[in-house]
Each structure stands twice: as C-alpha cells, then as structure tokens.
Image (tube, rainbow, N blue to C red):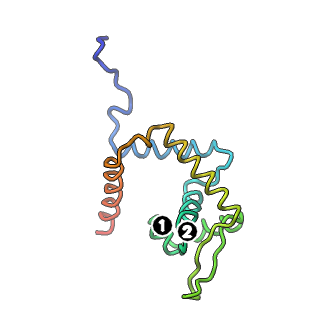
Amino acid sequence: MKENEKTLDKFDSMPFIALIHHISKNKLRYAQKNPNHIDMVHEGRYLMEIHKRKDLSQDDLATIFGQSKGTIAKALKKLEDKEYVERIVDENNRRKYILKTTEKGEELAILLKNDLEEWENAVGIDKLDENAKCQLREIARKTEEILKE
C-alpha cells in the first residue's frame, strides 16, 4: 500500500446520522461502566439539568427534552425515590412544583457532570470549535422544527 493511501473503515462510509447514533450509544455504554451510573438515558440527564437550572418545573423539563409529561413524571418519581430530587410547591402557583436537587442529588449531579466531561475530553469533543458546536445545535433545532410541521 502507498504511503498516501488510507484504508477505509466502517466510519468512512457510515451516514452522518448513523455516526451520531454510534457516538450516543457508545456514550451510554461508557456511562454504564461508571460506578456512579444511574439511567443516563433519562434520569442522569434530568438530574444534571435540574442541578444546573434553578426554578425548573416538571413541564419545563418535558419541554427541554422533548419528552411527554408522563415520561418525565416516571423519571422524576425514580429520582425522588432515590432521594436525589424533591418537588417544592411554587409559591406563585400552588398547582406547580419546582424541582430541586437534594444534597445527595447535588453530589451525584457533579459526579455525572465530571464523568461526562471526562468522556468528552477522551473522545475529543472538547476540541470542536464553537462554530462546529453551534452547527450541531442548529441541526438539533431543525430536527425538532421539522417534526412540528
């Protein structure tokens, strides 16, 4: 083989959307190896979002993740049962609950965030420039817009 020739592997011919799926799937597999692992498909992401944003409601969480209120309610119940999250009645709207991480939830959210950053650094996501990240976010937005049409 010549010096300039490159051997093709499965990623060279994989459609872009399949690459994204592959990356996501492998992140989940990586997370499951973590001793701090909770269901990163849902609960871990929700916990980190609740930790990051203050005064977040169950409806807000459903909107952010594009999930049904029922799906969010089930995940929150698991997080409450494990004492990671608590629901507090909103003083301005007694029918609305604000989500807060407990001390135990704060600790786990920080561990999960560190684990995510470690993985992103290991695979090189941290090396993407801001333009590439913005393009990926815009693609994600457009996928949701198309579904709403």
- Is 83 in front, or is 41? 83
| Position above or below: 101 against 122 | below
* x then y, percent, for residue 49: 53, 63
Which quadrant, please, contains the N terminus? top left
Q: Residue at x 53, y 73 (%)?
A: 56
* Alpha-carbon span between mark 2 and mark 1: 7 Å
Instruction: Please rate how many residues cluster around mark 1, counting C-alpha atoms within 10 Å: few if below 14, some from 14 to 19, many from 20.
Output: few
How many marks the image carries: the answer is: 2
Sequence-first tag of 2 and 1:
1
| Quadrant of residue 63 within the rendered picture | bottom left
The residue carrying pointer 2 sits among few (fewer than 14), some (14 to 19) or many (20 or more) residues within 10 Å by Cα, namely many
For the point 71% across and 63% down, which residue is it? 82
Residue assigned mark 2: 72
Residue 114, given in percent of the width and then of the height, sits at 58, 48
Q: Is residue 124 left or right of residue 3?
A: right
Tell me the kind of residue under disc 2: Ile
- Which residue is under mark 1? 67
SS assignment at label 1: loop
Residue at 36% over, 50% down: 133
**In this rendering, is residue 43 above or below 89?**
above
As helix, strand or loop, the secondary structure at mark 2 comes to helix
x 64%, y 75%: residue: 87
Would you identify the image quadrant in which residue 70 lies?
Answer: bottom right
Placement of the C terminus among the 4 image quadrants: bottom left
Q: Are marks 2 and 1 in contact (CB under 8 Å)?
A: yes
Q: Position of residue 77 (x, y in %)?
A: 65, 69
